[in-house]
Image: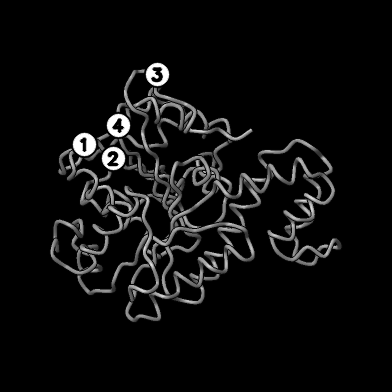
Amino acid sequence: MPFDVKNNGNGSGHPRSQIWAIGGGKGGSGKSLITSSLGICLSRTGKEVLLVDADLGGANLHSCLGTPYPNVTLSDFIRKKVPDIKDVIINTAIPNLRLISGAEDYLEVANTSYAQKIRLLRQLISLDTEYILLDLGAGTAFNTLDFFLIANDGIIIVTPEPTSIENAYRFIKSVFFRRLKRMINDARIRDIIVNAMDRKNELGIRTPVELLNYVESIDNEIGQRFKNEVLKLRPKLIINSVRTKGDINIGFSIKSTCLKYFGINISYVGHVEYDECVWQSVRRRRPLLLEYPNSRPAKCIERIAKNIIMNKEIEEEHF
């Protein structure tokens, strides 16, 4: 059964950490920059924030913060060179903001077992930190999907490009199937799920919604459980590097499509406008919100952070 951070307190009497996992399927969509910027927004409210570079095999979150590559990283914890997750946490130049730098490119780290991931998450939520932000790797590897599913809030970053949009749908579909497969032990139902992952399956199942209906038709109890779990997913969506109103509206199209074909109700929490200052801050290894605090992208990210905290989403008629 999946590990649920919502039902696993830190045991210290302190409020549980809120875990945000930032993913999206495609590399270069701005996940690390948005993760670091959201972390800065939260830290400015006085909250204790921990950023975790969970891109196991391709770490770069430290660069977005202008922090030198540290002597200890997530690799040391995963490979049990250090016993406690606290041993790999470093301070940043930003008050209330700490960092666990990502794993080095070791094959055994990039292919972390589910048990190792649970060990990592259990130690993370034991920390007296109000927010933990996981910067996930690109693609649909099990590591990425499991971290996304374990989080309180999964956030998907998409750019208004056909490849990014296509990869976002593939990522959401992979999240869907991974969630169902991890919650069921019935071999017959698992076989149906595996078959349905092939678009040319002999059952004629073409969409995740059709799979839910098919399972419900042969086992009403399991079908209802699946539908209830899918309703709980509620990932959040950010469109990055928008230039036009049409780019903004891509978010509403993705939301509509996911509800119709996946049965997943996505919350569209905002967009980030394109601006040259973004790549300039990356080149200078300076956080966007510090280098260009009054820029339009910085203001967009501040609004997005508020929307996520308040569980709000933007509405189409505003544009």
Label 1 or label 3, whichever lies nearer to me, is: 3
Q: Is residue 269 above or below residue 241?
A: above
Amino acid found under the numbered disc labelled 2: Leu
Residue drawn at the location 40% of the way across and 81% of the way down = 246
| Residue matched to label 4 | 129
- The answer for how far apart the CA atoms under marks 2 and 3 are is 22 Å
Instruction: Compare marks 1 and 2 and give the one earlier in the sequence.
Output: 1
Amino acid found under the numbered disc labelled 4: Thr
Residue 99: assigned label: 2
> In terms of depth relative to the viewer, which is nearer, 14 or 119?
14
Disc 4 crowd rating (10 Å Cα; few below 14, some 14-19, many 20+) is many
Amino acid found under the numbered disc labelled 3: Gly
Residue drawn at the location 46% of the way across and 48% of the way down = 57
Amino acid found under the numbered disc labelled 1: Asn
Disc 1 to disc 3: CB gap under 8 Å: no
- The answer for how far apart the CA atoms under marks 1 and 3 are is 24 Å
Q: Secondary structure at mark 1?
A: strand
Residue 11: assigned label: 3
Residue 86 in percent (x, y) is at 32, 26
| Residue matched to label 1 | 91
Disc 1 to disc 2: CB gap under 8 Å: yes
- The answer for how far apart the CA atoms under marks 4 and 2 are is 12 Å
Disc 1 crowd rating (10 Å Cα; few below 14, some 14-19, many 20+) is few
